[in-house]
Image: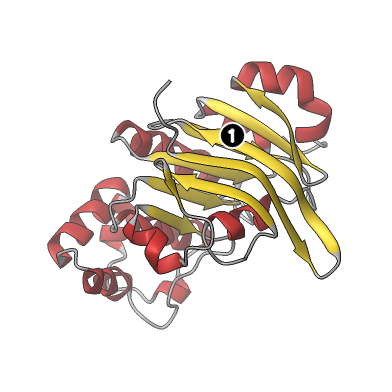
Amino acid sequence: MSVPILEVVDLHAAYGRIEVLRGVDLAVPKGAVMALLGPNGAGKSTLIKVISGQKSSTSGDVHLGGVHVKGAGPEELARLGLCTVPEGRSVFPNLTVQENLTLMSYAGVSTEAVLETAFTYFPRLLERRGQLAGTMSGGEQQMLAMSRALASDPALLLLDELSMGLAPLIVDELYDTVAQIAESGVSILCIEQFARTALRVSDYAAVMTGGRIVASGEPAEVLETMSDVILGGAA
């Protein structure tokens, strides 16, 4: 097996004396879409914070493309190809769509390339290019947040609760685009509370509860064996 794009080994993390990650093991193969599922409070968002350099672990290891990156900051991880679309959509509400995208050119990517990527994946953003980001719908803001992430040409994209607060039809549309992004060679880890849509476009799935990965494998297998944990009445 080739070196995974992301490998987490026996990872522990805590808030004060409360341990939230209790020995997490997770591997995302290169070029794959993996869904990380589980109920609220499972530790999913804390895991993403540790992987993306926003929070320190207490022990364990993180490798990105075979490089040991435990303790690396977000800027260093970005240079290594890791990009995160955080929960809650991080856009500048008082700037237009085009201004939000143009800001990414300061990271060394040409403005033309940034706009072409955004408008190819999300034609609706082309229609909204002069509109203030804060006046767009939640789904459109999520498209903009994803476009800004893609502008950095990531090797691994972390999507944290892509579906939060969005209508099911919009979520389906966004995950169709996730599948397109994966076809271009970007590896993707989707953190989701709502399972079925993420599983539809995933190559692999892992289930997290109680601060540990309790199951992993192909989506159909995971859905069959862990449906009581990952569906939780909301599919």
Picture quadrant where residue 38 is located: top right
The percent position of residue 35, horizontal first and vertical second, equals: 58, 36
The percent position of residue 200, horizontal first and vertical second, equals: 55, 27
Q: Residue at x 48, y 45 (%)?
A: 63
Q: Quadrant of the C terminus?
A: top right
Instruction: Check the image and name the residue furthest to the bottom.
Output: 94
The percent position of residue 172, horizontal first and vertical second, equals: 52, 38
- Is residue 75 at all visible to an observer of this figure? yes
Side of 127 relative to 158 (left or right): left
Determine whether the residue tagged by mark 1 lies in a helix, strand or loop: helix
- Is residue 144 at all visible to an observer of this figure? no
Q: Residue at x 51, y 59 (%)?
A: 52
Is the residue 78 above or below the residue 196 in the image? Answer: below
Label 1 sits on residue: 197
> In this orientation, which residue lies closer to the viewer: 124 or 221?
221
> In this orientation, which residue lies closer to the viewer: 72 or 131?
72
The percent position of residue 33, horizontal first and vertical second, equals: 47, 33
Q: Quadrant of the N terminus?
A: top left
Tag 1: residue type? Thr
Count of numbered circles in the view? 1
Q: Which scheme is used to colour this image of the protein?
A: secondary structure
